């Protein structure tokens, strides 16, 4: 790795060693946390860059068929590394280019976040004055499309 100990560290510094750099691809899947289901994909592509303990990624999914057995909280799986296991260490992601995901009445936004010690992340819904709600597998359709980008700690 690259050692930066010659630099004056900021208060709270825990390391000055850059010990990992990697670029690659991964295959994301969309499904339910209870029953993942076996979807059919037109596009199923993810790209990542790992620098130290951070993973930056972007992914795109476009479906052509949905498994009717899919059930539970809506998740996107297949991330290349397991997230940090530290309690309360949540990372939110940017969701864009979404099509054919149905939100519950009065909800207006889709959010994505990863919780500790996982290789998948949840999709949820937000609305003004409404409690946060996990999207359910029933919310996506046979031809859903979604793009997500973000970064998380490992």
Image (cartoon, helix red, strand yellow):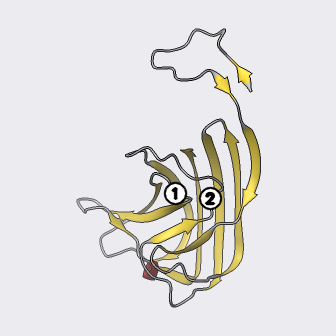
Q: Earlier in the sequence, mark 1 or mark 2?
A: 2
> In this picture, is 93 found above or below 107?
above
Classify residue 25 by image quadrant.
bottom right
Q: Is residue 5 left or right of residue 24?
A: left
Report helix, strand or loop for mark 2: loop
Q: Residue furthest left?
A: 129
Observer-nearest residue: 72 or 45? 72
Residue at image x 60%, y 40%? 54
Find residue 41 and report its horizontal and vertical position in percent. 68, 79
Q: SS of the residue at dot 1? A: loop
Residue at (44, 82) in percent of width and height: 138
Q: Position of residue 133 (x, y in %)?
A: 33, 66
Mark 1 or mark 2, whichever is nearer to me: 1
Could you tell me residue 37's position as x and y percent? 56, 83
Residue in view at x 50 percent, y 89 percent: 69
Q: Answer left or right for 69 relative to 65.
A: left
- In the image, residue 21 above or below residue 60: above
For label 2, the crowd category at 10 Å Cα-Cα, with few meaning under 14, some 14 to 19 and many 20 or more, is many
**Circle 2 residue:** 79
Q: Nearer the viewer, residue 115 or 151?
A: 115
**Is the C-beta separation of discs 1 and 2 under 8 Å?**
yes
Q: On the image, numbered disc 1 is attached to which residue?
A: 118
Instruction: Give the quadrant of the N terminus.
Output: top right
């Amino acid at each position: 790795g690259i050692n930066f100990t010659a630099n004056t560290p900021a208060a709270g510094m825990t390391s000055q060693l850059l010990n990992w750099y990697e670029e690659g691809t991964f295959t994301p899947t969309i499904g339910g946390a209870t029953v993942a289901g076996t979807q059919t994909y037109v596009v199923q592509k993810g790209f990542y860059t790992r620098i130290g303990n951070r993973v930056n990624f972007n992914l795109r999914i476009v479906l052509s068929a949905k498994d009717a057995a899919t059930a539970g909280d809506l998740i996107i799986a297949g991330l290349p590394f397991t997230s940090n296991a530290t309690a309360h260490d949540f990372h939110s992601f940017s969701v864009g280019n979404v099509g054919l995901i149905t939100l519950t009445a009065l909800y207006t936004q889709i959010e994505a976040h990863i919780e500790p010690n996982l290789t998948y992340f949840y999709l949820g819904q937000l609305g003004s004055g409404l409690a946060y709600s996990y999207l359910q597998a029933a919310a996506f359709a046979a031809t859903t499309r979604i793009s997500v980008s973000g970064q998380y700690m490992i």
